[in-house]
């Protein structure tokens, strides 16, 4: 379970990538990317099968529904939506782990870790978007 439980100050770049794919290629491709990313995580982890596709699909849906209230093209919207998606993903993970009788540490330490992870990922998401844009321009020019 050490590989599934959130670590202190865990930055989830995968959710920022889902949001970037949504901006660049649309919500259909972002959904496909989220499920594919979850399947790859399932293949390389020792967790229960189907856990990560569910988590990343929930994060995608949080970003998709959050786009109705916040602008994903602005830095503020990126921070908020990615932060909300990380919070939802981690909350669902903790809920599923407790339902299936895995040992989950005390709620106060987990909430601090969850909040730190969501804040760090949200605050770093505009930087990730900038790096992804630069990589995309370099790869398009080279191709």
Image: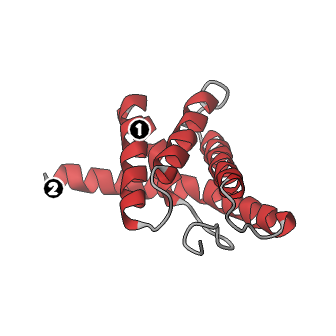
- Give the class, few, some or many, for how many residues have Cα within 10 Å of label 2's Cα (few <14, many ≥20): few
SS category of the residue bearing label 1? helix
Whole-number angstrom distance, CA of label 1 to CA of label 2: 24 Å
Left or right: residue 115 versus residue 15 is: right
Residue 6 % position (x, y): 64, 67
Residue 2 % position (x, y): 59, 75
- Give the class, few, some or many, for how many residues have Cα within 10 Å of label 1's Cα (few <14, many ≥20): many
In terms of sequence position, does the residue under pointer 1 or pointer 2 come before the other?
Answer: 1
- Find disc 1 in the rendering and name its residue: 30
Count of numbered marks: 2
Q: Residue furthest left?
A: 143
Position of the N terminus, as image quadrant, is: bottom right
For the question of whether residue 38 can be seen, the reply is yes
- Find disc 2 in the rendering and name its residue: 142
> What's the residue at 77%, 65% (across, down)?
110
Residue 63 vs residue 107, the one in the foreground? 107
> What's the residue at 55%, 52% (across, down)?
126
Q: How is the image coloured?
A: secondary structure
Q: Image quarter for residue 139?
A: bottom left
SS category of the residue bearing label 2? helix
Q: Is residue 1 above or below residue 59?
A: below
> What's the residue at 25%, 56% (across, down)?
138
For the question of whether residue 16 can be seen, the reply is no
Q: Image quarter for residue 84?
A: top right
Mark sitting on residue 64? none
Residue 125 % position (x, y): 56, 54
Eye-nearest disc, 1 or 2: 1
Residue 21 vs residue 39, the one in the foreground? 39
Q: Is residue 112 above or below residue 89?
A: below
Residue 77 % position (x, y): 63, 39
Left or right: residue 14 versus residue 26 is: right
Residue 85 vs residue 71, the one in the foreground? 85
């Amino acid at each position: 379970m050490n590989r599934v439980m959130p670590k202190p100050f865990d930055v989830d770049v995968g959710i920022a990538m889902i949001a970037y794919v949504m901006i660049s290629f649309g919500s259909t491709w972002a959904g496909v990317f989220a499920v594919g990313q979850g399947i790859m995580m399932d293949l390389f982890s020792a967790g229960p099968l189907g856990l990560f596709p569910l988590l990343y699909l929930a994060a995608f849906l949080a970003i998709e529904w959050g786009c109705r209230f916040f602008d994903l093209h602005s830095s503020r919207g990126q921070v908020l939506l990615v932060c909300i998606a990380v919070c939802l993903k981690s909350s669902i993970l903790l809920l599923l782990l407790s339902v299936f009788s895995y040992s989950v540490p005390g709620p106060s330490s987990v909430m601090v870790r969850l909040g730190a992870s969501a804040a760090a990922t949200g605050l770093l998401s505009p930087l990730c978007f900038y790096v992804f844009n630069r990589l995309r321009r370099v790869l398009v020019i080279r191709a």
